[in-house]
Amino acid sequence: MPCWRRRRSAALPALTIALVHFFFNFSAVVLIYGIKWLREIPLFMADKLSDLAVKNRMYAFGYLFIAFFILPGIIILFTA
């Protein structure tokens, strides 16, 4: 079913979530690119992680596991 044919009651929460997502990302971009020393942190960390991953692939897999499974799990655990 096309999105324009949805009921208004179902479209309002979706629009709310979309706007929250947009403004969260927009404010993060303004904050990170607006302050020079904050702009350097992700580049520095990516460079160091790539150096470690060249030596041993497990560092890259460990980072992915921690960033996408462990940290979200901890956040869900503490907020539930």
Image: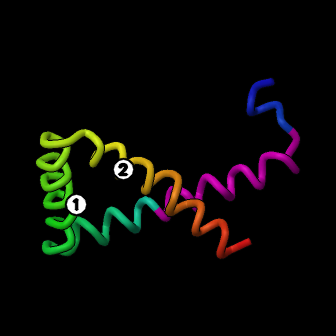
Q: Amino acid at mark 1?
A: Pro
Instruction: Tell me the residue that label 2 is attached to.
Output: 62
Where is residue 2 shown, x and y percent of the image? 75, 26
Where is residue 58 shown, x and y percent of the image? 29, 43
Where is residue 54 shown, x and y percent of the image? 14, 40
Q: Quadrant location of the C terminus?
A: bottom right
Q: Could you say which is closer to the camera, residue 33 or residue 3?
A: 33
Secondary structure beneath dot 2 equals: helix
Instruction: Tell me the residue that label 1 is attached to.
Output: 42
Where is residue 31 shown, x and y percent of the image? 31, 72
**Residue 62 magenta:** no
| Prevalent SS, magenta region | helix
Q: Eyeballing the image, is 75 above or below 7?
A: below
**Residue 20 magenta:** yes
**How did the renderer colour the structure?**
rainbow
Of labels 1 and 2, earlier in sequence is 1
From the viewer's perspective, is the residue at label 1 or at label 2 nearer? 2
